Image (cartoon, rainbow, N blue to C red):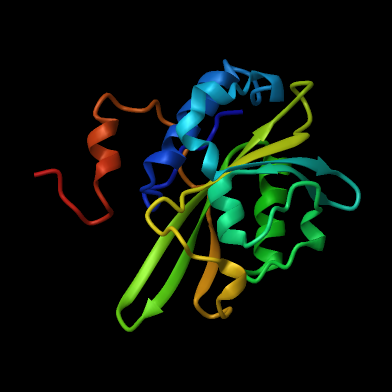
Amino acid sequence: MVPVSPPVEIVSPFVRELFAYWQRRSAGRLAPRPRDIEPGDIKRLLPYISISDVIAEPFDLRYRLGGTAVVETSGYDFAGQFLHEMPVTTGMEHWKKHYVRVVNEKRPFYGRYRGNLGPDLARYVDHGAFPLSSDGVVVDRIIEIEDWSEIRGVVLTGLDLPIWQFEPLPGRRMAEKLSPDIDATLARRPGESSA
């Protein structure tokens, strides 16, 4: 199965960096094994990463760990908790469908938080969810990243629901090898030109 690269809406260099790392560690397989992920290789990404075990029937996730920035944003440490137990204020059904796609289609999927912080003031936080497979057949873990690096100090549980919404992005672009000029692309926001 060919993986799906981040769509153009995903501008976070952290999400794109985790995709590139995930793709390298897959080494032509369905996905990396959990033991293929070396924390030292992705040290600067760790505050934004969560890892969960996939529970097949009924579908659920059990979180193994959450990075410090994700925990800060969530307002609590969710390690050891199940997805269905968590106080998800950004749309539980969106999240469940998002994760089910990762497991069933055995490839990465992406999404974005949109925060309406004031009149004409919207902020975005990019997200990527990547499958891991111990046996090369079944997706049994998910490694995900939420890039809160530009919006520190925000706590989702302390905000009203209309402020932050999560929207999964369709996985419509087949993976392309990261181009040599990827660094220049990552530095631009949608609508910005390279000149």
Instruction: State the residue lying farthest toward the bottom.
Output: 119
The part of the image, by quadrant, that contains residue 51 is top right
Q: Residue at x 63, y 62 (%)?
A: 75
Relative side of 181 to 33, left or right:
left
Q: How many marks?
A: 0
Q: Residue at x 50, y 28 (%)?
A: 42
Which one is in front, 120 or 170? 120
Q: Residue at x 62, y 23 (%)?
A: 37
Residue 46 horizontal/vertical position (percent): 54, 36
Residue 30 horizontal/vertical position (percent): 66, 25
Instruction: State the residue lying farthest toward the top.
Output: 27
Look at the picture and state if 39 lies above or below 111.
above
Relative side of 82 to 5, left or right:
right
Image quadrant for the C terminus? top left
The part of the image, by quadrant, that contains residue 84 is bottom right
Look at the picture and state if 36 lies above or below 74.
above
Residue 134 horizontal/vertical position (percent): 77, 23
Instruction: State the residue lying farthest toward the left.
Output: 195
Image quadrant for the N terminus? top right
Q: Residue at x 75, y 47 (%)?
A: 79
Residue 16 horizontal/vertical position (percent): 42, 37
